[in-house]
Image: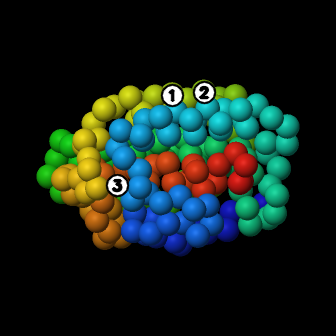
Amino acid sequence: MEIVPDGKDWTWVLERPCPECGLDARDIRSAAVGGMVRAVAASWVAVLAGPDVRVRPAPAVWSPLEYGCHVRDVFRRYDQRLELMLTRTDPLFPNRDQDATAIADRYGEQDPGTVAAGLRAAAGPLASSGRAPDDGATAPSSPSTPSPATSCTTRSTTCTTRPAARTGPDRP
């Protein structure tokens, strides 16, 4: 089955609630992100141990295995990006095509147990980093520019939980 390309700019979740799942990243405190990342990882590990993990509910919807791979890779990428934001001035992130990555890395063919272990391993450093700023309603933070040009900050690391929450185990 072919992966249907997703051309959305997901950084909008930093400005308003998601109409599909209700998550409002503006309400998430940096101190809560670690627990959220751990909880999301644990729920995905459970899903990846279940039956029919390779089955897509519809041709245009990823299987739980494909979503688990995506969440694992999002955790890895955000940990790398956070490190760059904290160690460099206004880093430019290369564009990441999630659909091309899913095809190139053969998400649907990966071993669910290996993906679960990778997801758990990817969540650990991000959840335990303690590198997010201590924030109030707004937080001073280091800027960066992903490609296409959209501004991100260390505060925006809260959106690491967004793809996982939106496409969580009960919503693949």
**Where in the figure is residue 104, as x and y percent of width and height?**
59, 52
**Where in the figure is residue 18, as x and y percent of width and height?**
54, 66
* Mark 2 Cα-neighbour bin, 10 Å: few <14, some 14–19, many ≥20: some
Which is closer to the viewer, label 1 or label 3? 3
Quarter-of-image position of residue 15 = bottom left
Q: Earlier in the sequence, mark 2 or mark 3?
A: 2
Give the amino acid type for the residue marked by disc 1 in the picture. Ala
Quarter-of-image position of residue 167 = bottom right
On the image, numbered disc 2 is attached to which residue? Answer: 117
Q: Is residue 101 above or below residue 87?
A: below
On the image, numbered disc 3 is attached to which residue? Answer: 156
The answer to the question of whether label 2 and label 1 lie on touching residues, with beta carbons closer than 8 A, is yes
Determine the CA span between mark 2 and mark 3. Answer: 26 Å
Q: Is residue 29 above or below residue 112?
A: below
Residue at 64% from the left image edge and 43% from the top image edge: 68
Give the amino acid type for the residue marked by disc 3 in the picture. Ser
Image colouring: rainbow
From the viewer's side, name the closer residue of 18 and 116: 18
> In terms of secondary structure, where does tag 2 sit?
helix
> In terms of secondary structure, where does tag 3 sit?
helix
The answer to the question of whether label 2 and label 3 lie on touching residues, with beta carbons closer than 8 A, is no
On the image, numbered disc 1 is attached to which residue? Answer: 121
Q: Is residue 82 visible?
A: yes
